[in-house]
Image: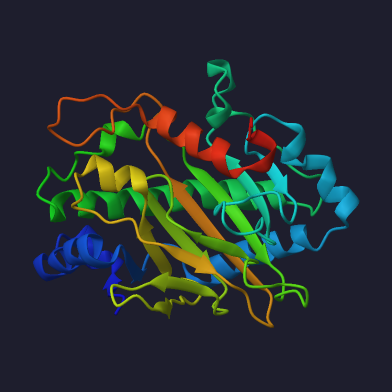
Amino acid sequence: MIPRLDFTQIVAREPETLAALGRAAHETGFLTVHNTPVTPARMRFVLAAYRAFFDRPEAEKAQVDMSVTGANRGWGASQSEQVDPDSNPDYKQVFDCGFEAPETGLPVYAPNLWPARPAGFREVIEAYYDDARAVALQILRGIAEAIGEDRAYFDDRFARPMALLRGNYYPPRPDWAGEKDFGIAAHTDYGCLTLLGADGVPGLEVLGRDGDWHAVTAAPGSFVINFGEMLESWTAGRVKATLHRVRGSSEERISVPLFFNPDFDTNVAPIGSGRVIRAGDHLSRRFNETYLHLKTG
Protein backbone atom coordinates (compact mmCIF):
# COMPACT_ATOMS: atom_id res chain seq x y z
CA MET A 1 0.00 0.00 0.00
CA ILE A 2 1.48 3.34 -1.07
CA PRO A 3 0.65 6.08 1.48
CA ARG A 4 -1.11 9.23 0.26
CA LEU A 5 -0.16 12.35 2.23
CA ASP A 6 -1.23 15.98 2.26
CA PHE A 7 1.68 18.28 1.39
CA THR A 8 0.32 21.12 3.52
CA GLN A 9 0.39 18.84 6.57
CA ILE A 10 4.02 17.95 5.90
CA VAL A 11 4.90 21.65 5.77
CA ALA A 12 2.84 22.29 8.92
CA ARG A 13 4.76 19.51 10.74
CA GLU A 14 1.57 17.70 11.68
CA PRO A 15 2.76 14.81 13.90
CA GLU A 16 0.69 11.97 12.41
CA THR A 17 1.62 13.01 8.87
CA LEU A 18 5.33 13.15 9.73
CA ALA A 19 5.08 9.72 11.34
CA ALA A 20 3.42 8.35 8.19
CA LEU A 21 6.11 10.02 6.08
CA GLY A 22 8.84 8.36 8.13
CA ARG A 23 7.20 4.94 7.79
CA ALA A 24 6.82 5.39 4.04
CA ALA A 25 10.44 6.43 3.65
CA HIS A 26 11.72 3.48 5.67
CA GLU A 27 9.32 0.70 4.68
CA THR A 28 8.15 1.24 1.09
CA GLY A 29 10.36 3.99 -0.32
CA PHE A 30 7.31 5.39 -2.15
CA LEU A 31 4.39 7.67 -1.36
CA THR A 32 2.14 10.15 -3.11
CA VAL A 33 1.48 13.74 -2.07
CA HIS A 34 -1.35 16.07 -3.00
CA ASN A 35 -2.40 19.64 -2.23
CA THR A 36 0.95 21.13 -3.30
CA PRO A 37 1.41 24.65 -4.73
CA VAL A 38 1.57 23.07 -8.22
CA THR A 39 -2.08 22.96 -9.24
CA PRO A 40 -3.58 20.34 -11.58
CA ALA A 41 -3.99 23.02 -14.27
CA ARG A 42 -0.34 24.04 -13.93
CA MET A 43 0.84 20.44 -14.20
CA ARG A 44 -1.30 19.83 -17.30
CA PHE A 45 0.28 22.94 -18.85
CA VAL A 46 3.78 21.58 -18.19
CA LEU A 47 2.84 18.15 -19.55
CA ALA A 48 1.44 19.79 -22.68
CA ALA A 49 4.75 21.63 -23.23
CA TYR A 50 6.69 18.37 -23.10
CA ARG A 51 4.18 16.65 -25.36
CA ALA A 52 4.51 19.46 -27.91
CA PHE A 53 8.29 18.98 -27.89
CA PHE A 54 8.16 15.20 -28.25
CA ASP A 55 5.70 15.60 -31.13
CA ARG A 56 8.25 17.63 -33.13
CA PRO A 57 9.99 15.94 -36.08
CA GLU A 58 12.97 13.78 -35.22
CA ALA A 59 15.30 16.05 -37.18
CA GLU A 60 14.32 19.02 -34.99
CA LYS A 61 14.82 17.14 -31.75
CA ALA A 62 18.20 15.99 -33.00
CA GLN A 63 19.34 19.61 -32.94
CA VAL A 64 19.48 19.31 -29.13
CA ASP A 65 20.56 15.66 -28.95
CA MET A 66 22.51 15.04 -25.75
CA SER A 67 24.49 12.25 -27.44
CA VAL A 68 26.76 14.88 -29.04
CA THR A 69 27.60 16.32 -25.61
CA GLY A 70 29.49 15.03 -22.63
CA ALA A 71 26.55 15.65 -20.34
CA ASN A 72 22.89 14.83 -19.77
CA ARG A 73 21.36 17.96 -21.25
CA GLY A 74 18.82 18.00 -24.07
CA TRP A 75 16.99 15.27 -25.94
CA GLY A 76 17.67 11.58 -25.53
CA ALA A 77 16.38 9.37 -28.33
CA SER A 78 14.72 6.01 -27.82
CA GLN A 79 17.27 3.41 -26.67
CA SER A 80 19.79 6.03 -25.55
CA GLU A 81 19.71 4.75 -21.95
CA GLN A 82 20.14 1.36 -20.34
CA VAL A 83 19.29 1.40 -16.64
CA ASP A 84 19.43 -2.39 -16.30
CA PRO A 85 22.40 -4.11 -17.94
CA ASP A 86 20.42 -7.34 -18.11
CA SER A 87 17.65 -5.72 -20.17
CA ASN A 88 17.69 -4.02 -23.55
CA PRO A 89 18.10 -0.22 -23.77
CA ASP A 90 14.93 1.61 -22.72
CA TYR A 91 12.56 2.53 -25.55
CA LYS A 92 11.40 5.86 -24.03
CA GLN A 93 12.52 9.32 -25.17
CA VAL A 94 13.66 11.95 -22.66
CA PHE A 95 14.42 15.65 -22.37
CA ASP A 96 16.79 16.70 -19.57
CA CYS A 97 17.71 20.06 -18.08
CA GLY A 98 19.31 21.03 -14.82
CA PHE A 99 21.13 23.53 -12.64
CA GLU A 100 23.71 25.44 -14.67
CA ALA A 101 27.20 26.30 -13.37
CA PRO A 102 29.37 25.96 -16.48
CA GLU A 103 32.28 27.76 -14.81
CA THR A 104 32.84 24.60 -12.73
CA GLY A 105 33.60 22.53 -15.82
CA LEU A 106 31.56 19.69 -14.31
CA PRO A 107 29.15 17.78 -16.60
CA VAL A 108 26.48 17.71 -13.85
CA TYR A 109 26.33 21.53 -14.08
CA ALA A 110 26.56 21.77 -17.88
CA PRO A 111 24.65 24.43 -19.85
CA ASN A 112 21.15 23.42 -20.87
CA LEU A 113 20.22 22.82 -24.50
CA TRP A 114 16.91 24.34 -25.55
CA PRO A 115 14.99 23.64 -28.78
CA ALA A 116 13.85 26.47 -31.01
CA ARG A 117 10.35 24.97 -31.03
CA PRO A 118 7.79 24.67 -29.62
CA ALA A 119 7.57 28.37 -28.84
CA GLY A 120 7.80 29.16 -25.13
CA PHE A 121 9.05 25.70 -24.18
CA ARG A 122 12.09 26.96 -22.30
CA GLU A 123 10.14 29.51 -20.26
CA VAL A 124 7.51 26.96 -19.18
CA ILE A 125 10.06 24.33 -18.18
CA GLU A 126 12.42 26.71 -16.37
CA ALA A 127 9.57 28.13 -14.28
CA TYR A 128 8.38 24.65 -13.36
CA TYR A 129 11.94 23.60 -12.50
CA ASP A 130 12.15 26.37 -9.89
CA ASP A 131 8.77 25.56 -8.36
CA ALA A 132 9.34 21.79 -8.31
CA ARG A 133 12.64 22.26 -6.46
CA ALA A 134 10.85 24.28 -3.78
CA VAL A 135 8.28 21.50 -3.31
CA ALA A 136 11.01 18.84 -3.16
CA LEU A 137 12.95 20.75 -0.50
CA GLN A 138 9.88 21.01 1.71
CA ILE A 139 9.36 17.25 1.48
CA LEU A 140 13.02 16.65 2.25
CA ARG A 141 12.66 18.83 5.36
CA GLY A 142 9.79 16.61 6.44
CA ILE A 143 11.93 13.53 5.83
CA ALA A 144 14.75 14.96 7.95
CA GLU A 145 12.42 15.54 10.87
CA ALA A 146 10.68 12.19 10.41
CA ILE A 147 13.97 10.27 10.71
CA GLY A 148 15.11 12.18 13.77
CA GLU A 149 17.40 14.82 12.27
CA ASP A 150 17.04 18.58 12.47
CA ARG A 151 14.39 19.78 10.03
CA ALA A 152 16.93 22.06 8.34
CA TYR A 153 19.59 19.35 8.09
CA PHE A 154 19.54 19.23 4.28
CA ASP A 155 18.93 22.93 3.56
CA ASP A 156 22.45 24.26 3.04
CA ARG A 157 23.40 21.16 1.08
CA PHE A 158 21.13 22.15 -1.82
CA ALA A 159 22.40 25.66 -2.64
CA ARG A 160 23.72 24.52 -6.06
CA PRO A 161 21.82 21.26 -6.42
CA MET A 162 22.57 18.63 -9.03
CA ALA A 163 18.82 18.70 -9.62
CA LEU A 164 17.85 17.18 -12.96
CA LEU A 165 14.41 17.79 -14.45
CA ARG A 166 13.33 15.27 -17.04
CA GLY A 167 10.42 14.85 -19.40
CA ASN A 168 9.79 11.19 -20.25
CA TYR A 169 7.84 10.16 -23.32
CA TYR A 170 6.69 6.55 -23.27
CA PRO A 171 5.12 5.53 -26.60
CA PRO A 172 2.64 2.67 -26.73
CA ARG A 173 4.53 -0.56 -26.05
CA PRO A 174 6.04 -1.57 -29.43
CA ASP A 175 4.86 -4.72 -31.19
CA TRP A 176 8.45 -5.95 -31.27
CA ALA A 177 8.96 -5.61 -27.52
CA GLY A 178 9.96 -8.79 -25.74
CA GLU A 179 10.56 -9.77 -22.14
CA LYS A 180 13.73 -7.67 -21.96
CA ASP A 181 12.19 -4.51 -23.43
CA PHE A 182 10.85 -1.75 -21.19
CA GLY A 183 9.94 1.91 -21.29
CA ILE A 184 12.38 1.96 -18.40
CA ALA A 185 13.66 -1.29 -16.93
CA ALA A 186 13.74 -2.13 -13.23
CA HIS A 187 16.04 0.20 -11.31
CA THR A 188 16.45 2.25 -8.18
CA ASP A 189 16.99 5.99 -8.57
CA TYR A 190 20.54 7.17 -8.06
CA GLY A 191 20.21 10.29 -5.96
CA CYS A 192 18.13 11.61 -3.07
CA LEU A 193 14.48 12.41 -3.70
CA THR A 194 12.42 12.09 -6.88
CA LEU A 195 9.31 14.25 -7.36
CA LEU A 196 7.31 12.70 -10.20
CA GLY A 197 4.46 14.47 -11.94
CA ALA A 198 2.54 12.52 -14.55
CA ASP A 199 -0.48 12.58 -16.82
CA GLY A 200 -2.43 9.93 -14.90
CA VAL A 201 -1.91 7.16 -17.47
CA PRO A 202 -0.92 3.93 -15.68
CA GLY A 203 2.54 2.56 -16.27
CA LEU A 204 4.74 2.95 -13.19
CA GLU A 205 5.16 -0.26 -11.20
CA VAL A 206 6.86 -0.63 -7.81
CA LEU A 207 8.31 -3.83 -6.40
CA GLY A 208 6.53 -4.49 -3.13
CA ARG A 209 7.79 -6.23 -0.03
CA ASP A 210 5.64 -9.19 -1.11
CA GLY A 211 7.78 -9.63 -4.22
CA ASP A 212 5.01 -8.52 -6.62
CA TRP A 213 4.92 -5.48 -8.89
CA HIS A 214 2.27 -2.91 -7.90
CA ALA A 215 0.91 -0.08 -10.06
CA VAL A 216 1.30 3.47 -8.76
CA THR A 217 -0.53 6.37 -10.39
CA ALA A 218 -0.99 10.05 -9.65
CA ALA A 219 -3.28 12.45 -11.47
CA PRO A 220 -1.88 15.81 -12.60
CA GLY A 221 -1.42 17.95 -9.51
CA SER A 222 -0.49 15.01 -7.29
CA PHE A 223 3.01 13.60 -7.17
CA VAL A 224 4.69 10.27 -6.66
CA ILE A 225 7.67 10.58 -4.30
CA ASN A 226 10.45 8.04 -4.07
CA PHE A 227 13.98 7.95 -2.76
CA GLY A 228 17.32 7.04 -4.28
CA GLU A 229 20.46 5.10 -3.47
CA MET A 230 22.29 8.21 -2.29
CA LEU A 231 19.72 9.07 0.38
CA GLU A 232 19.46 5.44 1.50
CA SER A 233 23.21 5.40 2.16
CA TRP A 234 23.32 8.94 3.53
CA THR A 235 20.67 8.15 6.14
CA ALA A 236 22.24 4.76 7.00
CA GLY A 237 19.19 2.89 5.74
CA ARG A 238 16.52 4.97 7.47
CA VAL A 239 15.24 5.79 3.97
CA LYS A 240 14.75 3.08 1.36
CA ALA A 241 15.47 3.09 -2.38
CA THR A 242 12.95 0.77 -4.04
CA LEU A 243 13.02 -0.95 -7.42
CA HIS A 244 10.51 0.34 -9.97
CA ARG A 245 9.92 0.10 -13.73
CA VAL A 246 7.67 1.04 -16.64
CA ARG A 247 6.82 -1.90 -18.87
CA GLY A 248 4.46 0.11 -21.08
CA SER A 249 0.93 -0.40 -22.32
CA SER A 250 -1.27 0.37 -25.33
CA GLU A 251 -1.37 4.06 -24.28
CA GLU A 252 1.35 6.68 -24.60
CA ARG A 253 2.42 8.31 -21.36
CA ILE A 254 4.24 11.49 -20.27
CA SER A 255 5.93 11.78 -16.88
CA VAL A 256 8.07 14.54 -15.41
CA PRO A 257 10.48 13.50 -12.65
CA LEU A 258 12.62 15.99 -10.78
CA PHE A 259 15.68 14.17 -9.46
CA PHE A 260 16.53 16.35 -6.47
CA ASN A 261 20.18 15.90 -5.56
CA PRO A 262 22.57 17.95 -3.40
CA ASP A 263 25.58 20.08 -4.25
CA PHE A 264 28.51 18.29 -5.88
CA ASP A 265 30.83 18.49 -2.87
CA THR A 266 28.26 17.43 -0.28
CA ASN A 267 29.41 14.56 1.91
CA VAL A 268 26.74 11.87 1.56
CA ALA A 269 28.49 9.19 3.59
CA PRO A 270 26.24 7.70 6.31
CA ILE A 271 25.52 10.36 8.92
CA GLY A 272 27.95 10.00 11.82
CA SER A 273 30.19 7.48 10.04
CA GLY A 274 33.23 9.73 9.76
CA ARG A 275 33.64 8.71 6.12
CA VAL A 276 33.61 11.00 3.07
CA ILE A 277 31.65 10.26 -0.12
CA ARG A 278 31.13 13.20 -2.44
CA ALA A 279 27.65 13.40 -3.92
CA GLY A 280 29.04 14.40 -7.31
CA ASP A 281 31.32 11.39 -7.51
CA HIS A 282 28.45 9.01 -6.78
CA LEU A 283 26.09 10.64 -9.24
CA SER A 284 28.64 11.01 -12.04
CA ARG A 285 29.54 7.33 -11.78
CA ARG A 286 25.90 6.24 -12.00
CA PHE A 287 25.20 8.55 -14.96
CA ASN A 288 28.23 7.12 -16.78
CA GLU A 289 26.83 3.63 -16.26
CA THR A 290 23.40 4.52 -17.66
CA TYR A 291 23.64 6.99 -20.55
CA LEU A 292 24.99 5.08 -23.54
CA HIS A 293 26.82 8.16 -24.88
CA LEU A 294 28.69 8.51 -21.57
CA LYS A 295 29.78 4.89 -21.23
CA THR A 296 33.51 4.45 -21.50
CA GLY A 297 33.81 0.71 -21.92
Query: Number of callouts in the render?
Result: 0
Q: Position of residue 255 (x, y in %)?
A: 57, 65
In this view, the residue farthest toward the bottom is 250
Quadrant including the N terminus: bottom left
Q: Residue at x 38, y 78 (%)?
A: 212
Q: Position of residue 92 (x, y in %)?
A: 68, 61
Q: Residue at x 62, y 74 (%)?
A: 248
In the depicted view, which residue is nearer to us: 146 or 173?
173
Q: Residue at x 84, y 58 (%)?
A: 56
In the drawing, does residue 23 fall left or right of residue 56? Answer: left
The quarter of the picture where residue 20 lies is: bottom left
Q: Position of residue 196 (x, y in %)?
A: 47, 62
In the drawing, does residue 69 fall left or right of residue 218? Answer: right
Quadrant including the C terminus: top right
In the drawing, does residue 147 fall left or right of residue 191? Answer: left
In the depicted view, which residue is nearer to us: 221 or 112?
112
In the depicted view, which residue is nearer to us: 107 or 248?
248
Q: Residue at x 43, y 52 (%)?
A: 189
Q: Position of residue 146 (x, y in %)?
A: 14, 56
Q: Describe the colour scheme in one phrase.
A: rainbow
* 277 lies above or below 214: above
In the rendered image, is residue 222 in sight?
no
In the rendered image, is residue 291 in sight?
yes
In the drawing, does residue 267 fall left or right of residue 262? Answer: left
The quarter of the picture where residue 52 lies is: bottom right
